[in-house]
Image: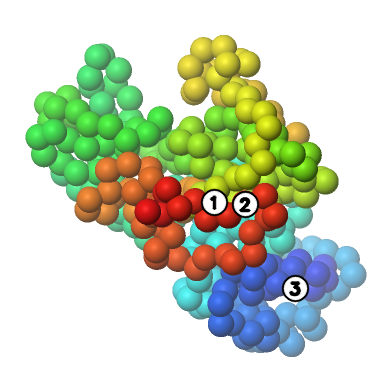
Protein backbone atom coordinates (compact mmCIF):
# COMPACT_ATOMS: atom_id res chain seq x y z
CA UNK A 1 0.00 0.00 0.00
CA UNK A 2 1.42 3.34 -1.10
CA UNK A 3 0.31 6.26 1.06
CA UNK A 4 -0.09 9.58 -0.77
CA UNK A 5 1.21 12.86 0.69
CA UNK A 6 0.56 16.41 -0.52
CA UNK A 7 4.12 17.33 0.42
CA UNK A 8 7.07 15.84 2.24
CA UNK A 9 6.62 17.82 5.46
CA UNK A 10 4.96 15.13 7.57
CA UNK A 11 7.33 12.33 6.51
CA UNK A 12 10.26 14.65 7.26
CA UNK A 13 8.87 15.47 10.68
CA UNK A 14 8.27 11.80 11.44
CA UNK A 15 11.86 11.00 10.47
CA UNK A 16 13.16 13.67 12.86
CA UNK A 17 11.13 12.26 15.75
CA UNK A 18 12.34 8.75 14.93
CA UNK A 19 15.99 9.83 14.92
CA UNK A 20 15.52 11.42 18.34
CA UNK A 21 14.19 8.09 19.62
CA UNK A 22 17.31 6.27 18.35
CA UNK A 23 20.90 6.15 19.54
CA UNK A 24 22.72 5.16 16.36
CA UNK A 25 20.56 5.98 13.34
CA UNK A 26 21.34 8.55 10.67
CA UNK A 27 18.58 10.73 9.33
CA UNK A 28 19.27 9.51 5.80
CA UNK A 29 18.84 5.89 6.89
CA UNK A 30 15.54 6.72 8.57
CA UNK A 31 14.37 8.52 5.41
CA UNK A 32 15.01 5.46 3.28
CA UNK A 33 13.43 2.96 5.68
CA UNK A 34 10.40 5.18 6.23
CA UNK A 35 9.87 5.63 2.50
CA UNK A 36 9.91 1.88 1.88
CA UNK A 37 7.41 1.19 4.66
CA UNK A 38 5.11 3.84 3.21
CA UNK A 39 5.14 2.10 -0.17
CA UNK A 40 7.91 3.88 -2.09
CA UNK A 41 11.16 2.63 -3.63
CA UNK A 42 13.20 5.16 -1.68
CA UNK A 43 13.11 8.68 -0.27
CA UNK A 44 13.63 10.21 -3.71
CA UNK A 45 10.57 8.34 -4.97
CA UNK A 46 8.49 9.58 -2.04
CA UNK A 47 9.66 13.18 -2.47
CA UNK A 48 8.98 13.13 -6.21
CA UNK A 49 5.45 11.83 -5.75
CA UNK A 50 4.35 14.71 -3.52
CA UNK A 51 2.21 17.54 -4.83
CA UNK A 52 0.96 20.81 -3.46
CA UNK A 53 -2.55 19.42 -3.22
CA UNK A 54 -3.55 16.17 -1.63
CA UNK A 55 -4.06 13.54 -4.36
CA UNK A 56 -7.48 12.04 -4.92
CA UNK A 57 -6.85 8.76 -3.15
CA UNK A 58 -8.60 6.63 -0.53
CA UNK A 59 -8.85 8.20 2.92
CA UNK A 60 -6.38 8.01 5.78
CA UNK A 61 -5.33 4.53 6.91
CA UNK A 62 -7.63 2.78 9.37
CA UNK A 63 -6.25 1.80 12.77
CA UNK A 64 -5.43 -1.72 11.59
CA UNK A 65 -3.33 -0.32 8.74
CA UNK A 66 -1.75 2.19 11.12
CA UNK A 67 -0.85 -0.68 13.44
CA UNK A 68 0.91 -2.54 10.62
CA UNK A 69 2.80 0.60 9.57
CA UNK A 70 3.97 1.31 13.12
CA UNK A 71 5.22 -2.23 13.58
CA UNK A 72 6.89 -2.24 10.15
CA UNK A 73 8.75 0.98 10.96
CA UNK A 74 9.80 -0.42 14.34
CA UNK A 75 11.12 -3.59 12.68
CA UNK A 76 12.90 -1.73 9.88
CA UNK A 77 14.70 0.63 12.25
CA UNK A 78 15.07 -1.62 15.30
CA UNK A 79 13.20 0.88 17.47
CA UNK A 80 10.74 0.23 20.32
CA UNK A 81 7.19 0.20 19.01
CA UNK A 82 6.13 2.67 21.71
CA UNK A 83 8.62 5.25 20.44
CA UNK A 84 7.51 4.69 16.86
CA UNK A 85 3.86 5.12 17.77
CA UNK A 86 4.70 8.39 19.52
CA UNK A 87 6.76 9.66 16.58
CA UNK A 88 4.12 8.75 14.01
CA UNK A 89 1.43 10.39 16.12
CA UNK A 90 3.36 13.61 16.87
CA UNK A 91 4.23 14.06 13.18
CA UNK A 92 0.63 13.38 12.11
CA UNK A 93 2.21 11.06 9.58
CA UNK A 94 -0.83 8.95 8.79
CA UNK A 95 -3.54 11.57 9.01
CA UNK A 96 -3.78 15.30 9.40
CA UNK A 97 -5.91 15.21 12.53
CA UNK A 98 -4.44 13.61 15.66
CA UNK A 99 -5.59 10.26 16.95
CA UNK A 100 -7.77 10.55 19.99
CA UNK A 101 -6.58 9.23 23.33
CA UNK A 102 -8.93 6.27 22.93
CA UNK A 103 -7.47 5.52 19.50
CA UNK A 104 -3.95 5.72 20.91
CA UNK A 105 -4.89 3.14 23.53
CA UNK A 106 -6.54 0.89 20.96
CA UNK A 107 -3.31 0.93 18.95
CA UNK A 108 -1.12 0.24 21.97
CA UNK A 109 -3.29 -2.59 23.26
CA UNK A 110 -3.34 -4.14 19.77
CA UNK A 111 0.45 -3.94 19.62
CA UNK A 112 0.72 -5.68 22.98
CA UNK A 113 -1.56 -8.45 21.82
CA UNK A 114 0.39 -8.99 18.64
CA UNK A 115 3.95 -8.57 19.90
CA UNK A 116 3.81 -9.27 23.63
CA UNK A 117 1.02 -11.68 24.54
CA UNK A 118 -0.04 -13.58 21.44
CA UNK A 119 -3.30 -15.51 21.31
CA UNK A 120 -5.24 -15.66 24.56
CA UNK A 121 -5.50 -19.07 26.28
CA UNK A 122 -6.37 -20.45 29.74
CA UNK A 123 -3.48 -19.96 32.15
CA UNK A 124 -1.46 -17.92 29.65
CA UNK A 125 -0.01 -14.61 30.88
CA UNK A 126 -1.51 -11.66 29.06
CA UNK A 127 -4.92 -13.29 28.63
CA UNK A 128 -7.77 -11.00 29.65
CA UNK A 129 -9.77 -12.87 32.28
CA UNK A 130 -12.79 -12.08 34.43
CA UNK A 131 -12.36 -11.28 38.10
CA UNK A 132 -15.37 -12.77 39.90
CA UNK A 133 -14.40 -11.69 43.43
CA UNK A 134 -17.05 -9.75 45.33
CA UNK A 135 -19.40 -10.20 42.36
CA UNK A 136 -17.40 -7.71 40.33
CA UNK A 137 -17.08 -9.63 37.03
CA UNK A 138 -14.47 -7.15 35.79
CA UNK A 139 -11.72 -7.73 33.19
CA UNK A 140 -8.07 -8.05 34.20
CA UNK A 141 -4.86 -9.28 32.61
CA UNK A 142 -3.55 -12.59 33.92
CA UNK A 143 0.02 -12.14 35.12
CA UNK A 144 0.69 -15.52 36.77
CA UNK A 145 -1.74 -18.39 37.27
CA UNK A 146 -1.68 -20.36 40.51
CA UNK A 147 -2.66 -20.10 44.16
CA UNK A 148 -2.93 -17.20 44.47
CA UNK A 149 -3.45 -15.93 40.92
CA UNK A 150 -1.73 -12.64 40.10
CA UNK A 151 -3.62 -10.10 38.01
CA UNK A 152 -3.22 -6.66 36.48
CA UNK A 153 -6.46 -4.77 36.94
CA UNK A 154 -7.40 -1.47 35.35
CA UNK A 155 -6.45 0.13 38.67
CA UNK A 156 -3.18 -1.77 39.24
CA UNK A 157 -1.61 -5.01 40.45
CA UNK A 158 -3.44 -7.47 42.68
CA UNK A 159 -4.16 -11.10 43.41
CA UNK A 160 -7.13 -13.42 43.70
CA UNK A 161 -7.87 -16.99 44.66
CA UNK A 162 -7.69 -19.22 41.59
CA UNK A 163 -11.43 -20.01 41.73
CA UNK A 164 -12.23 -16.28 41.57
CA UNK A 165 -10.68 -15.98 38.11
CA UNK A 166 -12.44 -17.22 34.96
CA UNK A 167 -11.12 -17.39 31.40
CA UNK A 168 -14.02 -16.63 29.03
CA UNK A 169 -14.57 -18.83 25.99
CA UNK A 170 -14.48 -15.77 23.73
CA UNK A 171 -11.46 -13.49 24.12
CA UNK A 172 -12.19 -10.23 25.92
CA UNK A 173 -11.05 -6.88 24.59
CA UNK A 174 -7.55 -5.72 25.46
CA UNK A 175 -7.13 -2.42 27.28
CA UNK A 176 -4.51 -0.04 28.60
CA UNK A 177 -4.77 -0.04 32.41
CA UNK A 178 -5.67 3.34 33.84
CA UNK A 179 -2.80 2.89 36.27
CA UNK A 180 -0.43 3.53 33.36
CA UNK A 181 -1.97 6.54 31.66
CA UNK A 182 -4.68 8.23 33.76
CA UNK A 183 -3.35 11.22 35.77
CA UNK A 184 -3.80 11.21 39.52
CA UNK A 185 -2.79 14.76 40.27
CA UNK A 186 -0.64 17.79 39.50
CA UNK A 187 2.49 19.20 41.11
CA UNK A 188 3.08 22.94 40.84
CA UNK A 189 6.76 23.88 40.85
CA UNK A 190 8.73 26.92 41.97
CA UNK A 191 9.56 27.92 38.40
CA UNK A 192 5.89 28.00 37.42
CA UNK A 193 5.94 24.64 35.67
CA UNK A 194 3.45 21.88 36.31
CA UNK A 195 3.99 18.14 36.35
CA UNK A 196 1.12 15.73 35.90
CA UNK A 197 1.75 12.56 37.91
CA UNK A 198 0.36 9.04 38.07
CA UNK A 199 -1.42 7.11 40.82
CA UNK A 200 2.01 5.82 41.92
CA UNK A 201 3.42 9.36 41.92
CA UNK A 202 5.54 8.82 38.83
CA UNK A 203 5.90 11.92 36.62
CA UNK A 204 4.01 11.69 33.33
CA UNK A 205 3.88 15.10 31.69
CA UNK A 206 5.85 18.30 32.24
CA UNK A 207 4.13 21.56 31.27
CA UNK A 208 5.95 24.87 31.09
CA UNK A 209 5.43 27.97 28.94
CA UNK A 210 2.99 26.11 26.71
CA UNK A 211 5.52 23.33 26.12
CA UNK A 212 4.41 19.80 26.92
CA UNK A 213 7.07 17.14 27.50
CA UNK A 214 6.76 13.42 28.17
CA UNK A 215 8.64 12.60 31.36
CA UNK A 216 10.36 9.35 32.21
CA UNK A 217 8.82 7.65 35.26
CA UNK A 218 12.25 7.19 36.87
CA UNK A 219 12.69 10.94 37.38
CA UNK A 220 12.51 12.76 40.71
CA UNK A 221 10.79 16.16 40.49
CA UNK A 222 12.35 19.02 42.45
CA UNK A 223 10.90 22.28 43.67
CA UNK A 224 7.34 21.14 44.32
CA UNK A 225 5.39 23.85 46.14
CA UNK A 226 1.86 22.54 45.77
CA UNK A 227 0.10 19.25 45.08
CA UNK A 228 -3.48 18.65 44.03
CA UNK A 229 -5.41 15.47 43.31
CA UNK A 230 -8.26 14.95 40.90
CA UNK A 231 -9.68 12.46 43.38
CA UNK A 232 -10.07 15.08 46.07
CA UNK A 233 -11.26 17.84 43.77
CA UNK A 234 -13.71 15.70 41.84
CA UNK A 235 -14.91 13.55 44.71
CA UNK A 236 -15.12 9.77 44.77
CA UNK A 237 -12.28 7.36 44.11
CA UNK A 238 -9.33 7.77 41.78
CA UNK A 239 -11.08 6.10 38.82
CA UNK A 240 -14.56 7.42 39.60
CA UNK A 241 -16.33 9.13 36.73
CA UNK A 242 -15.91 12.62 38.18
CA UNK A 243 -12.19 12.28 38.93
CA UNK A 244 -11.57 10.55 35.61
CA UNK A 245 -13.38 13.31 33.73
CA UNK A 246 -11.32 16.00 35.47
CA UNK A 247 -8.06 14.19 34.70
CA UNK A 248 -8.94 13.74 31.04
CA UNK A 249 -10.04 17.36 30.80
CA UNK A 250 -6.64 18.44 32.12
CA UNK A 251 -4.94 16.41 29.39
CA UNK A 252 -7.26 17.87 26.75
CA UNK A 253 -6.57 21.42 27.97
CA UNK A 254 -2.91 20.89 27.07
CA UNK A 255 -3.74 19.01 23.86
CA UNK A 256 -2.20 15.83 25.20
CA UNK A 257 -3.39 12.89 23.12
CA UNK A 258 -0.31 10.68 23.17
CA UNK A 259 0.44 8.09 25.84
CA UNK A 260 2.97 8.79 28.61
CA UNK A 261 6.24 6.88 28.87
CA UNK A 262 4.84 5.09 31.91
CA UNK A 263 2.76 2.90 29.57
CA UNK A 264 6.04 1.42 28.30
CA UNK A 265 6.32 -0.44 31.61
CA UNK A 266 3.54 -2.84 30.57
CA UNK A 267 5.76 -5.70 29.23
CA UNK A 268 7.85 -5.68 32.40
CA UNK A 269 4.83 -6.16 34.65
CA UNK A 270 4.63 -9.74 33.36
CA UNK A 271 8.24 -10.62 34.13
CA UNK A 272 9.24 -12.86 37.01
CA UNK A 273 9.90 -11.19 40.36
CA UNK A 274 8.09 -7.99 39.38
CA UNK A 275 5.61 -7.40 42.18
CA UNK A 276 5.07 -3.65 42.07
CA UNK A 277 4.96 -0.69 39.72
CA UNK A 278 8.34 0.39 41.05
CA UNK A 279 9.79 -3.00 40.08
CA UNK A 280 8.42 -2.50 36.58
CA UNK A 281 9.86 1.01 36.26
CA UNK A 282 13.21 -0.29 37.47
CA UNK A 283 13.17 -2.98 34.76
CA UNK A 284 12.13 -0.43 32.13
CA UNK A 285 15.02 1.82 33.08
CA UNK A 286 17.48 -1.05 32.90
CA UNK A 287 16.20 -2.31 29.55
CA UNK A 288 15.77 0.83 27.48
CA UNK A 289 17.37 3.94 26.09
CA UNK A 290 17.67 6.52 28.84
CA UNK A 291 17.52 10.23 28.10
CA UNK A 292 20.34 12.21 29.67
CA UNK A 293 18.84 15.65 29.01
CA UNK A 294 16.37 16.14 31.86
CA UNK A 295 14.28 19.23 32.55
CA UNK A 296 15.94 21.58 35.01
CA UNK A 297 13.45 20.53 37.67
CA UNK A 298 14.18 16.79 37.42
CA UNK A 299 16.86 14.28 38.33
CA UNK A 300 17.15 10.49 38.61
CA UNK A 301 14.93 9.05 41.32
CA UNK A 302 17.47 7.07 43.33
CA UNK A 303 14.79 5.65 45.59
CA UNK A 304 13.05 3.96 42.66
CA UNK A 305 16.22 2.85 40.90
CA UNK A 306 17.71 1.52 44.10
For residue 251, what is the image quadrant?
Answer: top right
Residue at 52% across, 65% down: 290
- Earlier in the chain: of badge 1 and badge 2, it is 1
Q: Residue furthest right?
A: 52
Q: Give how far across and how far down residue 127 sits, in percent.
A: 27, 43
Query: Label 3 belongs to which residue?
Result: 12
Please give the count of numbered marks on the rendered protein: 3
- Earlier in the chain: of badge 1 and badge 3, it is 3
Helix, strand or loop under label 1: strand
Helix, strand or loop under label 3: helix
**What number is the disc on residue 245?**
none
> For the residue carrying disc 3, how many other residues have a C-alpha within 10 Å: few (<14), some (14-19), or many (20+)?
some
**What number is the disc on residue 298?**
2
Residue at 23% across, 21% down: 132
State yes or no: discs 1 and 2 in contact (Cβ < 8 Å). yes
Nearer to us: label 1 or label 3: 1
Separation (CA) of disc 1 from disc 3: 30 Å
141 left or right, relative to 69: left
> For the residue carrying disc 2, how many other residues have a C-alpha within 10 Å: few (<14), some (14-19), or many (20+)?
some
101 and 192: which is toward the camera: 192
Query: Label 1 belongs to which residue?
Result: 219
Q: Give how far across and how far down residue 35 sits, in percent.
A: 65, 79
Residue at 56% across, 44% down: 203
> For the residue carrying disc 1, how many other residues have a C-alpha within 10 Å: few (<14), some (14-19), or many (20+)?
many
Amino acid sequence: MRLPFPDVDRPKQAAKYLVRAATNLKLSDVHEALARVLGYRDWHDLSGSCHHHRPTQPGDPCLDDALNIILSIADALGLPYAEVQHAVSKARLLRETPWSLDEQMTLRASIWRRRLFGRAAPGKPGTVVKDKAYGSNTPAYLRRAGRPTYLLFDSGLGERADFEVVTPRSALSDFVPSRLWLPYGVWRLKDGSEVIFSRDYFPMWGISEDRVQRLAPWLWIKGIIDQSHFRKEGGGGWTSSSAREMAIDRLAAHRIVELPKLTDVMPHLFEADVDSMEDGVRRLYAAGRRDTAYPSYAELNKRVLG
